[in-house]
Image (tube, grey):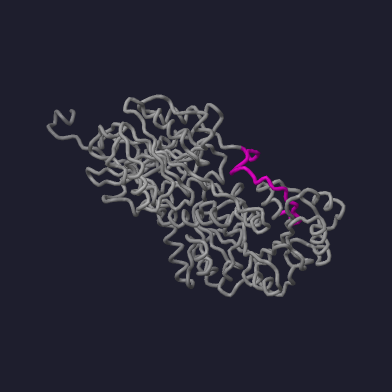
Amino acid sequence: MTDAARGGARTLAPARPARRWLAAAARVAGEQRAGRDVAVPGPDVRRGGPPRPEVVVVVASDRLADLLEPEWAQRRAAAQDATVLGTHLSGADALVLEWSGGPGSAHDVTADEAAAVLAAARALRVPALVWDTVRAAGDRPLAPAGATVVGADAAARVAAYGARGDATVELGSTFSARRDGARVRLRPGAAHRHEGAPAEADAALVAALDSHHAARPRPSDGRTWRATVLTGDASRDVVTPGLLRSAAAGSVVVTTSAAVAGRVPGVLAVDGADDARWTLAALDRHAELRDRHAHRARRAALAGWSATVRAGQLLDAAGLGATTVPSVSAVVATMRPDRLDDVLDAIARQRHPAVELVLVTHGFEVGREELAARAAARGLEHVRAVAADASLTLGACMNLGVDAADGTYVAKMDDDNYYGQHYLADLVATFGCTAAQVVGKWAHLTYLESTRAALLRFPAVEHRYTRLVQGGTIVVERELARAVRFEDLPRRVDTTFLDKVRDRGGRVYAADRFGFVSVRTARTAEHTWRVTDAELLAKPSRLLFYGEPWEYADV
């Protein structure tokens, strides 16, 4: 007899654990379809921007020479081979000599050999730069005098060279953002890594690690864990190359040094064994806590510690000019005059140092003086308006904006979404560690104004090459945007544009989920994508909380 025949209501049995696991796996697989058929570029594909044109002779250890090689036109030489060195110096723009303390150090060069290299550069009037890579003052001797500029990783060494009368610049440790800057798949748990000599503060961390059963990978083990606990030099206030590589890979770095945490925001400093145990347990339990700390530390590593940054510092010190920060033209096409202040606020909020706004006014015009005054009130200097007839499509309006843009990159931004202060800077940095021509976001926050619900859509699609990114987050090389063009369509211009980029062999990369909120009003007709809130909630997403998400998104 059926339930209906019995007169009873049919109840659904709760899902079994296996069914719940299968449902979750299916949901993740569905979210990842955007990148399922996208191959990861091989190791031979160049990551990051183009190298600087200067010819630089590098006399250094293999580690440092390999880090610097992609950053300029490099000629590698040995201090002991005067003939080859003289040939390489002919026509060079600069010389970089590593000094790591003399014989028995990482770069086994004697003081006499280093002095001869500097003399050869002076004879040919080639600016000579010494990079002192000794991490602590210690008793290591200084490099021989005679360099144009001396850069050092340790502040005490910089002071010592300055006291001797040398022109100096403080550098610091470095890593290759091109090679090690992309986020990787992280192993669960924590790992203990040690660099340098043991430090007194290490004992507390080691005790916490023993109780936490942390992994102890060999130095050659390239895998990365969700948390990385560093002992040794990091406990003595030294930002080490291993710390930078771990941060760039997306691992949360834990150390005992408050000074290191201050220099690399996002790194966690613990005070004693108990604090370390609780911190590791909290990181193990809360993915959101891990992701937010890891995101800040990764941003800091890419922005201030990469080999690209160090190469620019060295060349600038040699009088060859600093590396130019890539500029961004934010192209915003709007048909709503009442949204102009919101657009200007979004651009004024950006921390990227080189941003211009190209405002495409669709069906209306704004006075030049009025726009300049409203921009100036927010500290904006580079703002221009392009008038577009009301009969033009969205795609045609975008092409007008792209043609007017001056930036290295073009960012397609909307007039009704929220863009956090690091939004453009984070996406531009992503070009420096990937082989992508288009960068944007697929995982992202959505805010439903009618119910104040904050959703996380497609959370499984971060830090990966993909087919699509959200239209309001597209950042693309300007020359590529001009070559590909947006289709002359009223909607779906983003999807067709990305299809055309991929057809030309271009790559699309979905970055992190932070710094952007897609804002949906209850007035569906106002949106290019006309979907109701109920439909949106039924699609793959995670309901996070109720309330405005601006502070939450702006990590």
Q: Residue 235, relative to residue 387: is it above or below?
A: below
Q: Residue 299, relative to residue 427: is it above or below?
A: below
Asked whether 43 falls inside the magenta stretch, the response is yes
Viewer-side residue, 302 vs 31 = 302
Task: Say how many tags the image has.
Answer: 0
Asked whether 173 falls inside the magenta stretch, the response is no
Q: Name the residue: 40% across, 37% down.
A: 470
* Residues shaded magenta: 42-62
Determine the residue located farthest toward the front in the rendered image: 369
Residue 522, quarter of picture: top left
Q: Is residue 235 left or right of residue 289?
A: right
In which quadrant of the rendered image does the N terminus lie? top left
Find residue 88 and report its horizontal and vertical position in percent: 80, 49
Per the picture, the main secondary structure of the magenta-coloured stretch is loop
Q: Name the residue: 39% across, 51% down.
A: 348
Q: Is residue 22 visible?
A: no
Viewer-side residue, 547 vs 28 = 547
Find residue 177 and report its horizontal and vertical position in percent: 59, 50
Find residue 243 and report its horizontal and vertical position in percent: 57, 59
Q: Residue 100, relative to residue 459: is it above or below?
A: below
In which quadrant of the rendered image does the C terminus lie? bottom left
Determine the residue located farthest toward the right in the rendered image: 83
Q: Is residue 419 visible?
A: yes
Viewer-side residue, 234 vs 91 = 91
Find residue 265 and report its horizontal and vertical position in percent: 48, 61
Q: Is residue 123 left or right of residue 47?
A: right
Q: Is residue 497 left or right of residue 87?
A: left
